[in-house]
Image (spheres, rainbow, N blue to C red):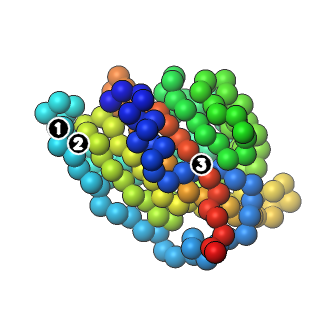
Amino acid sequence: MKKTSVIVAGAALSALAFGAPVAVGAAAASAPQHVEVAQHAQVAKHGAQPTRATIDALFGQWNAAVESGDPEEVADLYASDAVLLPTLSPEVRTTRAGIVDYFEHFLAKNPSGERLQSYVTVLDGRSAIDTGVYRFTFTDEDGTTTFADARYTFVYEKQHGQWLIVNHHSSLLPDAS
């Protein structure tokens, strides 16, 4: 899948948040919701379709890297030409250095993520989109915890046998109107 089509697909879906701690919203108080993987027919062109479990594991891998506190480890999960649209920065991150810089600041808040809703679309044997809502728990040095609920989109592409994030968009979940 060409980078531009992945970016367009990612931009067309819900956004992902790395926001500052905020009050927990009522929309996120529900139990986690998972939607079945939508499968598209390009198996012959790109190989076997990844499973829902494969895509779920990618979020688990990303969250484990976030919990490690190491911005380099997080950046290792992004393609060399990935686009990161972070919530707490007006700067679109399109280089490894920019992605590392963003996560240096974000990881200082000691975050841990949990998906509350997840909608996975498998585009073909080497690309998939996971979009939904997740909650970050932040732990201050004194042990105080705060929460931020956010919308997210991860666009994944399998490159040289490894699943990488090619587009990651983040936004705080708005208050209900």
Q: How many marks?
A: 3
- Packing grade of label 1 (10 A; few <14, some 14-19, many >=20) is some
At 30% from the left edge and 46% from the top edge, which residue is drawn?
Answer: 122
Whether residue 9 can be seen here: yes
Residue at the spot of label 2: 49
The amino acid on which the numbered mark 1 sits, given as a three-letter code, is Val
Residue at the spot of label 3: 170
Examine the image and state in which quarter residue 50 appears: top left
The amino acid on which the numbered mark 3 sits, given as a three-letter code, is Ser
Q: Is 46 situated left or right of 60 in this image?
A: left
Which of the numbered marks, if any, corresponds to residue 172?
A: none
Whether residue 64 can be seen here: no
Labels 3 and 1 touching (C-beta < 8 A): no
Q: How far is the residue under mark 2 from the one under mark 1? A: 6 Å
Labels 2 and 1 touching (C-beta < 8 A): yes
Q: Earlier in the sequence, mark 3 or mark 1?
A: 1
> Where's the C terminus, which quadrant?
bottom right
Q: Earlier in the sequence, mark 2 or mark 3?
A: 2
Q: How far is the residue under mark 3 from the one under mark 1? A: 30 Å
Q: Is 119 situated left or right of 90 in this image?
A: left
> Where's the N terminus, which quadrant?
top left
Rendered location of residue 64, percent (x, y): 56, 46
Element class at badge 3: strand
Rendered location of residue 75, percent (x, y): 58, 31
Residue at the spot of label 1: 43
The amino acid on which the numbered mark 2 sits, given as a three-letter code, is Gln
Q: Is residue 17 above or below residue 104?
A: below
Rendered location of residue 90, percent (x, y): 72, 39
**Nearer the observer, 164 or 73:** 164
At 42% from the left edge and 29% from the top edge, which residue is drawn?
Answer: 4
Q: Earlier in the sequence, mark 2 or mark 1?
A: 1
- Packing grade of label 3 (10 A; few <14, some 14-19, many >=20) is many
